[in-house]
Amino acid sequence: MNTSFFKPILLLAIFASLSNLVHSAAIYPIQNAAILAGSQFDIKVELDSVVSIEEVDVRLNGKPISSTIKQQVSFIPNEAGKGSSLLYRDVQLAKAGPYTLTVKTSQATQQVTWDVYASGPRKVKNIILFVGDGMTIANRTSARVLSKGISEGKYQGKLSFDDMPNMALIGTSGSDSLITDSANSMSAYTTGHKTAVNAMGVYVSRASDNLSHPKVETIAELIKRKTNMSVGIVSDAELQDATPGAMVAHTRRRADKSYIADQLLASGAEVILGGGSAYFYPQTSNGSKRKDEKNLVEQFKLKGYELAFTKNELLKMGNAVGTKKLFGVFHPDNMDGSLDRFFLKKNTVEQYPDQPDLTDMTRSAINVLSKNPNGFFLMVEAALIDKFNHPLDWERAAFDTIMLSNAVQIAKDFAKTHPDTLIIVTPDHTHSGSISGVVNDAKPGPLREKVGVYADAGYPNYPKANIEGYPNQIDVSKRLAFFYGNYPDHYETLHPKLDGTFQPAVKDESGKYVANPKYIQLQEDAIHVGGNLPSHQESGVHTADDAVLNAIGPGAEQFRGFMDNTEVFKVMVKSLGLGQ
Ligand SMILES: [Zn+2]
């Protein structure tokens, strides 16, 4: 018998039943979600037809859901014209094990299975999580070349996180897409749940309001609800940016920056340091980006926070014996990177000359937080690595990777006297970019002929780094040839951008991004590079390449091999015993 005749029919039948499962409804948390026992989350069931609540049978492990979950269901008869929805807010499942949620109507049956896991007892006192936003292997290598030097094939030193004993490759994709953004990927670290691009602390449902999507609890909220530990949030980006925001916020859109600023205040985190002052002041004050009259700085003060607006104020308040809570903002927007602050004085350094370094913020945060005998959780973001990888400005990214290394060293020094501290250093996602050789100005011929590869590359001639680990010159005659793998149209100059961050592309009259003519005007042998990204992209984009995580301290041995980003949350909550 010729069975191939039947295959299409069989496939069609399977497909029909699958599509029935996929399209007729959605349930959040999604299939295969891992949920910390006792953590708070919302359950949402979306049906694709309008039903009455009596027609819906919701069961958890075969029993009516009301026998396990005491929360009142809120019923949305017809959500956005797409069908009825059921929402259970602030649910907790105390017991570990597999859970199956089954939803039956007269038309369809939907089902998801979750793995609810317990944490066991607490094993560490403190966790310091460093996020090198968008940090790639090439960022690390270029930072090591510039900071430590390399001779006859051997590096003359290591970055502070190079010699951590444990390492893992981290997968960073979200529930909706292979390529993540920082909201999505940081949310996986802070909640243990996958979400979608631009979302944090929620599953993206069909709700029309950004703040109404089903929520999952963040590690900062868990700590505040279940322990007497302190929490610190440090970033050199705006504090309302995706990475610090995902510590405290629940929104479908990371652009809800006033809301995220409100959540920072509401979080009760003892230390909050970074940029983004524009969202902490009322709309009537100069430079504010709020649309209301809230003065969050005043409210931080009323809540007993010491305030700092300059590096000196930070050092003073960070060192003061009496400081228990510290709020510092040092820039209306993202802070400036170390190449500009220490050497070039470009971008906004002249306007804001009093910005602290990530090392100052890390040291102050640890000083304040470590006064709590119950321990602390501190998140420090080196945000500008990502902000400089986007515009293909590898030197600035390398300098901020060196700055991250210096900040991590402060945490390692603290851990020497506080060995019950777990330190994790990880990117949230990666960028493209690789070191392909050495640009040598002495080589004859047009610009591209100056790129030496293999034996022709030799070594760069950056001067020996200063005590902070930075070389005091980057426009040397033999420089790294660092090329990004995805880009808009741009001019390749093979020179560092001494006049401010590279701006590879600008919009033309038709709205497409084209190579920024500034660079061919500045350097007439610059090479025009046709973009390999869609023409609406103004800069390089994140990649799905694995992120490299390093860790040291009790529990660090759980980081090994390839891991999903949600598993980083799992290791942290298990270490802190947050799901007992
Ligand atoms: Zn980015």
Image (spheres, rainbow, N blue to C red):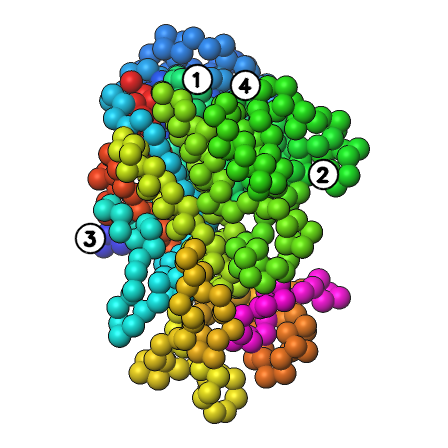
Look at 54% across and 19% down and name the residue there: 51
- Dot 1 or dot 3: first in sequence order is 3
Give coordinates of residue 125: x percent, y percent. 31, 26
Q: Does 404 appear in magenta?
A: no
In magenta, the rendered stretch is 490-511
Local SS, label 4: loop
- Dot 2 or dot 4: first in sequence order is 4
Instruction: Assign the magenta stretch its main secondary structure.
Output: loop
Q: CA distance from mark 1 to mark 4?
A: 37 Å
Q: Are marks 1 and 4 in contact (CB under 8 Å)?
A: no
Q: Which residue is mark 2?
A: 289
Q: Which residue is mark 1?
A: 225
Look at 29% across and 43% down and name the residue there: 551
Q: Which residue is mark 4?
A: 51
**Comparing labels 2 and 4, the label whose residue is closer to the camera:** 2
In the figure, residue 512 lies in which quadrant?
bottom right
- Dot 1 or dot 4: first in sequence order is 4
Q: Which one is in front, 272 or 503?
A: 272
Look at 67% across and 35% down and name the residue there: 279
Give coordinates of residue 417: x percent, y percent. 29, 34
User: What is the quadrant of the C terminus in the image?
Assistant: top left
Q: CA distance from mark 1 to mark 2?
A: 31 Å
Q: Which one is in front, 296 or 574?
A: 296
- Say which amino acid is labelled 1: Arg
Q: CA distance from mark 3 to mark 2?
A: 73 Å
Q: Are marks 1 and 2 in contact (CB under 8 Å)?
A: no
Q: Which residue is mark 3?
A: 1
Give coordinates of residue 220: x percent, y percent. 44, 27
Q: CA distance from mark 4 to mark 3?
A: 47 Å
